[in-house]
Image: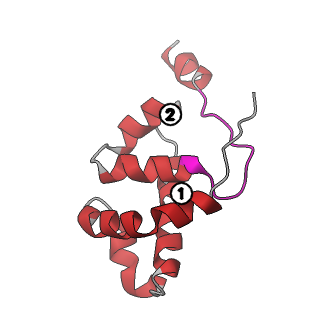
Amino acid sequence: MIKEDRLSVSRPLLKTKGFSTLHLQIFEYILIGKTNREINRILGYTERSHAVVDHSRKVMYKLLAMEDLHKAYFKDRVVYPRKFQFWWKKLLDKHKTELLTMAIAPKFYE
């Protein structure tokens, strides 16, 4: 029965393939110190979902591109964003308005 309960709580399937405001929201949750499990629970993803990691990386790569920084040199900051959260927060604050103009509203399959 426990397995059935876990399977019935499925992650919301994102219709939009582009960069959305959900990506920014997830990244902001990371920057305020929420764990991946907490974020998964808040957004309705399964415990083992990698959506939080994938979506937050999308934001980090965009921020690196906006700063004209090469991914390879900042790999540790992408892998451990919480360890460098103040650095990421500074970049996010600097480019947030530009990111919000790029981001689209997320749409989900029902």
Q: Identify the residue at image location x=39%, y=87%.
A: 73
Q: What stretch is highlighted in magenta?
A: 10-22
Say left or right for 103 vs 73. right
Say left or right for 31 vs 106. left
For this rendering, which residue is in front, 100 or 80? 100
Q: Dot 1 lies on which element?
A: helix
Q: Identify the residue at image location x=56%, y=46%.
A: 22
Coordinates of residue 30 in the picture (x, y in percent): 35, 51
Say left or right for 59 vs 104. left
Q: Dot 2 lies on which element?
A: helix
Whether 2 is drawn above or below 83: the answer is above
For this rendering, which residue is in front, 25 or 34? 25
Amino acid marked by disc 2:
Leu
Whether 3 is drawn above or below 83: the answer is above
Coordinates of residue 95 in the picture (x, y in percent): 46, 68
Q: Is the magenta stretch mostly helix, strand or loop?
A: loop
Q: Distance between the residues labelled 1 and 2?
A: 14 Å
Pick whichever of labels 1 and 2 is earlier in the sequence.
Answer: 2
Amino acid marked by disc 1:
Asp
Picture quarter containing residue 15? top right
- Residue 54 is marked as 1
Coordinates of residue 2 in the picture (x, y in percent): 49, 16
Whether 17 is drawn above or below 58: the answer is above
User: Which one is closest to the eye, mark 1 or mark 2?
Assistant: 2
Coordinates of residue 44 in the picture (x, y in percent): 53, 30
Q: Is residue 58 visible?
A: no
Q: Mark 2 points at which residue?
A: 43
Q: In which quarter of the image is the C terminus?
A: top right
Whether 19 is drawn above or below 87: the answer is above
Q: Identify the residue at image location x=48%, y=41%.
A: 48
